[in-house]
Amino acid sequence: MPDLSKYLEQTDNNLVTILPCKLTLDASNYELDKNIQIFEDHVWVSSLISKIEYEDLMFNLILDYPVDIPVQKEMDLKEGIEVEFEKNSILLTVSSGSLAFKKQSQFLERLLGGREIYKDVNHLLQKIYSLFNSSGLDLVHLEVLTSQCLRDRSNLSIPARLGKTWDPTMVNIKEVVFQSGFVQALSFENINKSLETGLIYGEDLEPSILERVLTGTLIEEKNK
């Protein structure tokens, strides 16, 4: 595997080529004005599927978010787009919208992993709303997301809002399944953890939808 740090480097939201290269976009991957727009000084793509060629190296560069590619002359998508870059020049720029998406992704990773820092539940919900209010999600969707991450401290198998007393604690979403039933836990990758759930869990839990599907109970009920 070649050391790409000899060819590319990131500065802020720009990707810079250290050596001269050529970037190629295949026309078959794009449709003008839908996922690609061509301007006088740059080309915008909703996601990047490209090939980069150096004197001694060629590889595909694929990015699943919008970028701007600077150009020096008029481009035509019909034959595909080829752009040549001199050394130490900007290869592409990540748009501000992509940076916001990255921030959202990092927040979700912390939240679902049970690692997000917050003062209280109101503060947490405000953080979620401020990050995702422009995405078109209803507030109820954000509430469901929050309630899956905040569990009842005395019974992690249920959302905190369903507990006998309001005592929420944030948990790793991957751990929730092991608190929700033995059969359901077996359908996930950690068999030892699921056996532990079945052997020592002290409460008689109502089977989840997933458990009823796995055991065929849901199908039997429909056939009655």
Image (cartoon, rainbow, N blue to C red):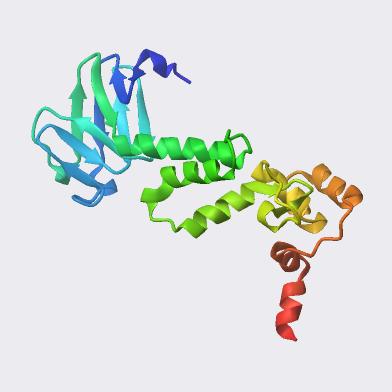
Residue ID at (76%, 71%): 216
Position above or below: 219 against 12: below
Q: Quadrant of the C terminus?
A: bottom right
Name the side, left or right, on which 140 lies relative to 28. right
Q: Nearer the viewer, residue 117 or 24?
A: 117
Residue ID at (31%, 23%): 15
Q: Nearer the viewer, residue 98 or 4?
A: 98
Name the image quarter holding residue 79. top left
Name the side, left or right, on which 23 lies relative to 216. left
Q: Position of residue 138 (x, y in %)?
A: 44, 58
Position above or below: 108 against 4: below
Name the side, left or right, on which 41 lies relative to 131. left
The reply to whether residue 127 is in sight is yes
Q: Position of residue 83 (x, y in %)?
A: 19, 29
Q: Position of residue 48 (x, y in %)?
A: 32, 38
Residue ID at (84%, 49%): 197
